[in-house]
Image (cartoon, rainbow, N blue to C red):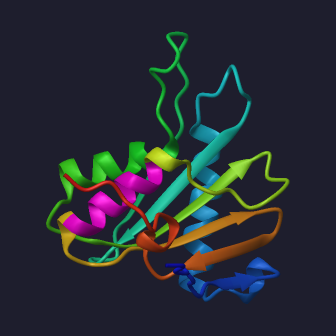
Amino acid sequence: MEKQFRFDYEHYASLDELSEADRQLVEAAQEATTRAHAPYSHFRVGAAARLRSGRILHGSNFESEVYPAGLCAERSLLFYAQANYADDPIETLAIASDPSERECYPCGQCRQVMVDVERRQGAPMRVIMSGNGTASAVATATMLLPFTFIL
């Protein structure tokens, strides 16, 4: 039996099309790329999350000589948020990269952790993926990982 998985997403041909709050969050993610430690790949990723309280948190990727001991920006941010603000759900997560020749999409591990965070907080997390002056957004991280791992 054939089945299909489809979802809607928002695409912004220019960051100017984003709401002011989303544009500020993308700018915070872009700024977080400056704090990335990427001496091997030279691909700096930044993430910014807006919590329900309005607080903005930041994260960036960190590479290690002892590969694969590094960590993506999204997971750095999500683990920090869950450890320090577990009672303040993440409403929106923005991702940016430098260089940004295209929109920056999360890796599979980050997608799974995003879904785990949504489950833990009992609320969806909007995800904005930006780069090269454009952005795409999904209403929930589960749209990025339809066949998620569940114990």
Residue 76, image x, y percentages: 40, 42
28 or 137, which lies in front? 137
Residue at figure coordinates x 47%, y 63% from the top left: 145
Q: Quadrant of residue 43?
A: top right
Does 70 appear above or below 109?
A: above
Residue at figure coordinates x 55%, y 81% from the top left: 4
Residue 6, image x, y percentages: 57, 83
Does 2 appear above or below 98?
A: below
Say if the magenta span includes residue 128: no
Magenta-drawn segment: 110-119
Residue 32, image x, y percentages: 57, 49
Residue at figure coordinates x 69%, y 65% from the top left: 130
Q: Quadrant of residue 33?
A: top right
Say if the magenta span includes residue 113: yes
Taking 30 as reference, is 15 left or right? right
Taking 52 as reference, is 17 left or right? right
